[in-house]
Every structure is written in C-alpha cells, then in structure tokens.
Image (cartoon, helix red, strand yellow):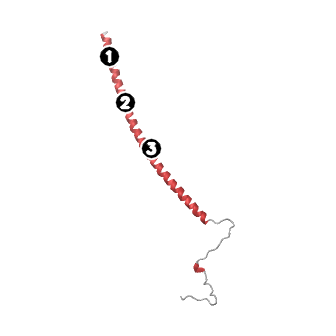
Amino acid sequence: MVEKSKAVTEEMAAQAGSVTVTTESIAAVASANSTATEQVSGSAAEMGGQIGRIAEEAEQLAEISASLRALVARFRLEAGGPVVERRRSNDWAPAPCRPGARRKAS
C-alpha cells in the first residue's frame, strides 16, 4: 500500500510538472498575443488618423469643386442668348469731334 501511495504521489508530481510547463506555455502565448494586439491597436489608431486626414482633404476638394463650379457658371452663356463682343479700348477709334466742342490739350 505504501508503494502504491508512493507511485501515485510520483505520478501526481509528474503531472504537476506537466501542468506547470503547460501553464508557462499558455502564459508565453498570451504574452505574444498581447504584443500582437498592441501592434494591431497602434496600426488601427494610425489608420484612423490617416482616414481623418483623407476626410479633411476630401472636404477641401469638395469646397474647391463647388467654387470652380460657381466660377464656371458665371462664365457660361445661356443657350440662344445674344453674344456681345467686347473690344479693348485700344481698338476703339477716337470719337469724332462735335462742332463747337472744345478739345483737350494733349
């Protein structure tokens, strides 16, 4: 009976050692997973910042687009409307003098 008890005790000690090794292995894997999770979290935060910058740039582009559309609308001619030619002041001939009008000295 003593020998059987001794054998059971040795077996339990061996199993306890095995449990300790397994527990240490689980702890190492958990630590590695924790490190990986921190890296993923950091990457996600960086991506969030990039998304914020992209959203700001998209908003600025939308504002520029609206501004350009407004400028184009100012210069767009209505269909069928008369087109008025404009001339530069250098193209104009001097106005004829009216009789009796005074001329300015040049």
Q: Residue at x 30, y 10 (%)?
A: 2
Cα distance in 3D space between marks 1 and 3: 51 Å
- Left or right: 70, with 11 as reference point: right
Image quadrant assignment for residue 66 = bottom right
Identify the amino acid type marked 1: Thr
Cα distance in 3D space between marks 2 and 3: 28 Å
Q: Which residue is mark 3?
A: 44
Identify the amino acid type marked 2: Ser
- Where does the image place residue 54, in percent across and percent down from the top left? 49, 51
Check the image and report above or below for 6 versus 52: above
Please tell me which residue lies in front, 50 or 4. 50
- Left or right: 98, with 52 as reference point: right
Callout 1: few (<14), some (14-19), or many (20+) C-alpha neighbours within 10 Å?
few
Check the image and report above or below for 54 versus 87: above
Check the image and report above or below for 14 versus 39: above
Q: Which residue is mark 1?
A: 9
Q: Residue at x 50, y 51 (%)?
A: 55
Which numbered disc, 2 or 3, marks the residue that appears first in the sequence?
A: 2
